[in-house]
Amino acid sequence: MNDDHFEQAYNAQAAVDTETYLVVGQLVTDSPNDKQQLNPVLESIPAEVAQPENALADTGYSGEKNVKKS
C-alpha cells in the first residue's frame, strides 16, 4: 500500500463578517466543490448573530441557483 497521496475528504466553509473578520457561520461537507455551498453556509449563520443582506463569494460558488436564491 502506497501512502504517498493526498485525498480531500471534506470541504469546510466559513461565513466571515467583512467588518470584524469574525467567523459568523460554518459548515463541513463531503461535497467535492463549492458550487452548492453558498446558500447552506449563509443559512448556517444564526439569526441572533447576523442577517446578511449581501454576500461576497469567489467564482467557485458560481451557479444559477445561488444567484437566484441569494
Image (cartoon, helix red, strand yellow):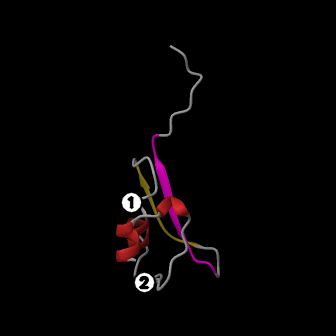
Q: Residue 37: which quarter of the image?
A: bottom left
Q: Earlier in the sequence, mark 2 or mark 1?
A: 1
Q: How far across and down, in percent of the image, does residue 52 sit?
A: 47, 83
Residue at image location 38% in from the left, 72% down from the top: 43
Q: Which residue occupies the foreground of this view, 55 or 49?
A: 55
The residue that disc 1 covers is 36
Residue at image location 45% in from the left, 40% down from the top: 9
> Relative to residue 48, is residue 23 depicted above or below?
above
Please tell me whether residue 48 belongs to the stretch shown in magenta: no
In front: mark 2 or mark 1?
1
- Report the amino acid beneath label 1: Gln
Q: Residues within 10 Å of mark 1 (few under 14, many from 20)?
A: some
| Range shown magenta | 9-18
The residue that disc 2 covers is 48
> Relative to residue 66, is residue 1 depicted above or below?
above
Label 1 residue SS: loop
* Residue that lies at the very extreme toward the top in this rendered image: 1
